[in-house]
Image (cartoon, grey):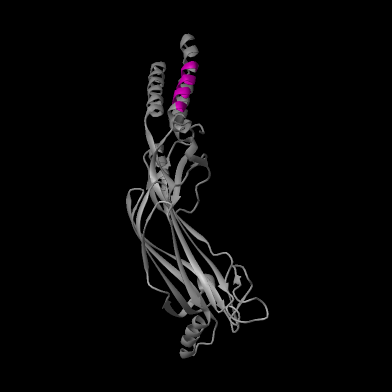
């Protein structure tokens, strides 16, 4: 009789393996949707007589300092580009501001005590498609920039360090990869202005990647059929063990019961660890579970493992002050 039962389970497991291996399954995958690039380039023309450079010389990026007495104006280009995974059709508006502020601290502890913005020209609106590049050119009068920022600082009677940045705000709206989008991105160029010169970093490029989740087909894997495959081979082994016993007409009832218990517990082995139940349980709310399968289901739901006290035969979980327990005869074989 048991041989017939195990044979039926083998057939069922085989059908289960076939169904799992041939069914179509999907999973979520994060892929790049689009990338924004923004950078600044600059140069300073020598317009004043000086002992260092001939008038008309252009000082390129990367100088340690640019002197007010030599090159008081800074020619700047803001370059913005947009790359989508498939397509893009956007209305883009760019506005550049001089942002002067008083800051103290650094990192997450930094606090802005005051901030004042000065416009650099009028906002510019362009239409952009995938891969297009937008360039906005402007000139900064550095002594005038210093004067405007210092005037605010003086009126506030604020003596701490002054921070000056050129910030271009890019607003975009339209379609990317066929989907409607709307967003804003700021690109900053810090400028350090002291009494007789100003400094600008040599590296000013930045990028921002935006991702999206897509549903992709997952190829069949061994992990998908692990449990039914385990049942199939387990029952094959059990049938192989029972056939000689049937031929000898000598059935050990206790042995068969042991095998049956092993078979029932086998699917849950990977969820169970050995341990000892705590002695003081007065502080825990106790919930009795009717079967080992139900206890394993609870463990899966709350992301815990089932603990087996082999001495008492008790299976239990302790989670958030609650004891979930299943009682079993301690004389049973260990799993």
Which residue is located at x 47 percent, y 19 percent?
236
Q: Is residue 328 above or below residue 140?
A: above
Quadrant of residue 119 within the rendered picture? bottom left
User: Across the whole image, how many numbered discs are drawn on residues?
Assistant: 0
Q: Main secondary structure of the magenta part?
A: helix
- Expressed as whole percent of the image width and height from the top left, the position of residue 183 reads 37, 61
Which residue is located at x 46 percent, y 17 percent?
239
Magenta span covers which residues?
Answer: 229-240
Q: Is residue 163 above or below residue 307?
A: below
In front here: 21 or 35?
Answer: 35
Q: Image check: 195 left or right of 80?
A: right
In front here: 251 or 25?
Answer: 25
Q: Report if residue 105 is visible in the image.
A: no
Q: Is residue 169 above or below residue 215?
A: below
Which residue is located at x 49 percent, y 22 percent?
255
- Expressed as whole percent of the image width and height from the top left, the position of residue 90 reads 35, 56
In front here: 14 or 168?
Answer: 168
Residue found at the very far right of the displayed protein: 51
- Expressed as whole percent of the image width and height from the top left, the position of residue 216 reads 40, 39
Q: Report if residue 207 is visible in the image.
A: yes
Q: Is residue 139 magenta?
A: no
Q: Quadrant of the N terminus?
A: top left
- Expressed as whole percent of the image width and height from the top left, the position of residue 330 reads 48, 36
């Amino acid at each position: 009789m048991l041989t017939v039962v195990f044979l039926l389970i083998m057939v069922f497991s085989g059908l289960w393996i076939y169904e799992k291996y041939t069914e179509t399954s999907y999973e979520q995958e994060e892929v790049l949707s689009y990338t924004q690039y923004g950078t600044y380039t600059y140069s300073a023309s020598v317009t004043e007589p000086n002992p260092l450079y001939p008038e008309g010389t252009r000082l390129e990026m990367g100088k340690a300092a640019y002197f007010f007495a030599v090159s008081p104006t800074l020619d700047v280009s803001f370059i913005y580009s947009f790359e989508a995974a498939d397509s893009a059709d956007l209305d883009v508006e760019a506005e550049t501001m001089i942002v002067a502020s008083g800051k103290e601290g650094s990192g997450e502890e930094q606090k802005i005590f005051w901030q004042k913005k000065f416009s650099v020209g009028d906002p510019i609106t362009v239409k952009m498609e995938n891969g297009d590049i937008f360039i906005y050119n402007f000139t900064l009068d550095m002594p005038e920039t210093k004067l405007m920022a210092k005037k605010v600082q003086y009126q506030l009677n604020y003596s701490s360090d002054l921070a000056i940045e050129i910030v271009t705000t890019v607003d975009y709206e339209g379609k990317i990869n066929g989907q409607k989008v709307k967003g804003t991105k700021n690109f900053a160029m810090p400028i350090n202005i002291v009494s007789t010169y100003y400094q600008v970093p040599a590296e000013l490029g930045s990028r921002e990647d935006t991702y999206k989740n897509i549903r992709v087909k997952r190829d069949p894997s061994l992990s998908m059929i692990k449990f039914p495959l385990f049942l199939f081979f387990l029952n094959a082994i059990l049938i192989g063990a029972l056939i000689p016993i049937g031929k000898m007409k000598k059935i050990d009832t206790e042995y068969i019961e042991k095998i049956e218990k092993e078979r029932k517990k086998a699917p849950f082995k990977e969820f169970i660890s050995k341990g000892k139940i705590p002695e003081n349980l007065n502080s825990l709310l106790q919930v009795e579970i009717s079967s080992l399968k139900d206890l394993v289901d609870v463990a899966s739901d709350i992301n815990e493992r089932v603990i087996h006290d082999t001495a008492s035969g008790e299976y239990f979980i302790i989670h958030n002050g609650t004891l979930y327990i299943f009682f079993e005869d301690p004389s049973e074989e260990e799993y």
